[in-house]
Amino acid sequence: MDKRKKVILDLMEDEFYVPMKEKELAVMLQVSKEDRNELNRLLNELLAEGKISITKKGKFIRAKHSDKLLEGIFISHPKGFGFVEIEGREEDLYIPESCVNGAFHKDKVRVALLAGQKGKRQEAQVIEILERSIKQIVGIFDKSNKNYGFVIPDNAKIGEDIFVPTERSKGAVSGHKVVCEITSYGKDRRKPEGKITEILGHVNDPGVDIMSIVRGYELPMEFSDKIMRQVENVSNDVSEADMAGRRDLRDMTMVTIDGEDAKDLDDAVSLSKDGELYHLGVHIADVTNYVQENSALDREALKRGTSVYLVDRVIPMLPHKLSNGICSLNAGVDRLALSCLMTIDSKGEVISHEIVESVIKVDRRMSYTSVRKILEDKDEAEIKEYESLVPMFELMAELAAILRNKRKKRGSIDFDFPESKIILDKNGRPIDIKPYERNVATKIIEDFMLIANETVAQHFYWMELPFVYRTHDNPDPEKIAKLSTFIRNFGYTIKSKQEEIHPKELQKLLTKIEDTPEEALISRLTLRSMKQAKYTIDSSGHFGLACQYYCHFTSPIRRYPDLQIHRIIKEQIRGRMNENRIEHYDAILPEVAKHSSEMERRADEAERETDKLKKVEYMSERIGEIYEGVISSITAWGVYVELPNTIEGMIHVSMLPGDYFYYDEQSYEMVGQATNKRYKLGEKIMVRVNDTDKLSRTIDFVIPQEWELDLEEDM
């Protein structure tokens, strides 16, 4: 090789090499103006030989050296800088504003590491945008001029407004919430451009706020005509042909237990006792009988991945005719099911089990409230109403307690804190926010579904067949350290060894805090300190449940992974799991697991955003009111305070009275520079609601003055 080419390539081998334009390379190589043509010729030859490549910005980079370049997902920050998440790498890369190079939030990018980081977060530069993620945005239209307007994105992470020429504005006026398709992502200091595809309504119109979130997360609301025609052809009744070859369990006493407003009943339970042995049946609607693999309906279900439960609506994975009809285990009618029939001893061990295709008939549709009244309240009217079933409910409570105790012994973490239930009026305005409590009935169903999921997962693990598992990795040591600091303020401790913690330690903590005022807060923060569970094709274990084998088997109406493994189970039962089918599942399941995890995260984020929106709306009518809360988080920019109703707001660091405050990263405290006044995690604090912002979905608190507190006491 020409020695001069080798010099260029050696320069590009530098560990922290950043792509350079020809002019910058000339400076680095000390090439004179007279020799610039020769450098250009050498670079063109190297390009032709495939030894270097050129980015969209016209910068040169050593080719085929993926160890020098990294790929990941860009996460932007409203202030202009960003981070790149790289799979398998613990810490994200920091992207300075000058190195973003036109990347948008959630773009897939290629980055080069920057030199000079000593003890700081590794910095990098975006050198290529591999794939655009956001194709449309939702925001408020601002008609700035007769010839054009701008869309101000709802998503604060998209730091630039979108320029829209009047002819592409669809007649939108200032204050309209709109969906805007991005036609250009902007370059050379020009703003991104777009066209309005939908006007959702005025920003203050009822329902527009939630619909903005739905469109912002690109949640599909309607099913296509093709899918609806396919669904119309599905029978409303189970035929004799459908029942052929199935285990007939219609004489077995069984019930569904759900919330009063539930419409898609996909699990039924049965229980009897023979001596010391319990015979538990968990019967799950056989949705796959009506959703054929690779049909239009199946492809749509996979695309959605999950049903989404927003504060004012449900966006289902399957059309209602299926989920509320033939796939719903309604009482008194024949239904097709997959049944996990378990024999369990007095210690909670599953000593034998069968997984069978069945036909069932539910005896009664029960609600959590009714079962609670029977078992906890000993309500005479309720007991009389369901007299023949009461002994089975008592047996259920007995077995559920055994199963729960067994899980507890091995270290399973049971989060028993109240979720918030947001009550809306007919116009979608929040009128109350209250805890949504678990009770004996919800725990029975939870315990029975958990044991069925474990049993099915273990069964298929040992068969060594392709499968989709539900896994949960160990928490990050840094988050556990923060949690440890937080709970010390309440007098609690947790032990961890070699940067790892056993789930039993967290379970012990949750036991200690039972029935204390801080229980809900510490439980929630413990949950936040853990990683997110996901779907995988390997059974790597579930930290939170302290078990090796776990899957989602029990909700095929609302979760695609359950639907997917039902197909595998049925093929295995029918003896059809041959080499071709194994190869088929080996090929498709990695993407099914990955996509389902992503769709679950999207649904969780949308649900959280709608909750936050309504909480902000609720507090906007309570500005000036004083509450007692607990410091739930501290950052460099402020102190977060959580109220008893689960609403969280922030006191900005500049609003902390009496001193200049700074954040001490070692102790996770906010410290007054002159007074040494400290705000600690877990500390109780009085706050006044100062302001709310529906667009950013934030609530601002301040610390009330003494006279305000005195006035509060007098009222």
Image (cartoon, helix red, strand yellow):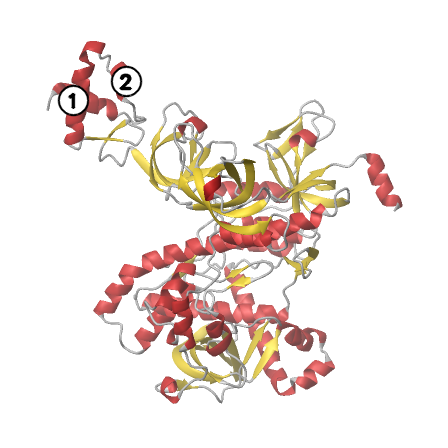
Residue at the (52%, 35%) spot, across then down: 78
Disc 1, SS: helix
User: Which residue is under mark 2?
Assistant: 23
Foreground: 262 or 703?
A: 262
User: Which residue is under mark 1?
Assistant: 42
Query: Could you tell me how many numbered marks the image carries?
Result: 2
Q: Position of residue 570 (x, y in %)?
A: 34, 75
Asked if residue 694 lies left or right of residue 407, the reply is right
Residue at the (48%, 49%) spot, across then down: 531
Q: Position of residue 232 (x, y in %)?
A: 42, 76
Q: Quadrant of residue 123?
A: top left
Q: Position of residue 549 (x, y in %)?
A: 41, 63
Farthest residue, direction right: 714
**Cα distance in 3D space between marks 1 and 2:** 14 Å
> Is tag 1's residue or tag 2's residue first in the polypeptide sequence?
2
Which image quarter holds the N terminus? top left
Instruction: Specify few, some or many for label 2: CA neighbours under 10 Å numbering under 14, 14-19, or 20 or more.
Output: some
| Vertical relation: 64 (above or below) 536 | above
Amino acid type, residue under disc 2 in the picture: Lys
Residue at the (29%, 64%) spot, across then down: 585
Foreground: 192 or 291?
A: 192
Q: Position of residue 349 (x, y in %)?
A: 47, 72
Instruction: Specify few, some or many for label 1: CA neighbours under 10 Å numbering under 14, 14-19, or 20 or more.
Output: some
Residue at the (68%, 35%) spot, across then down: 679
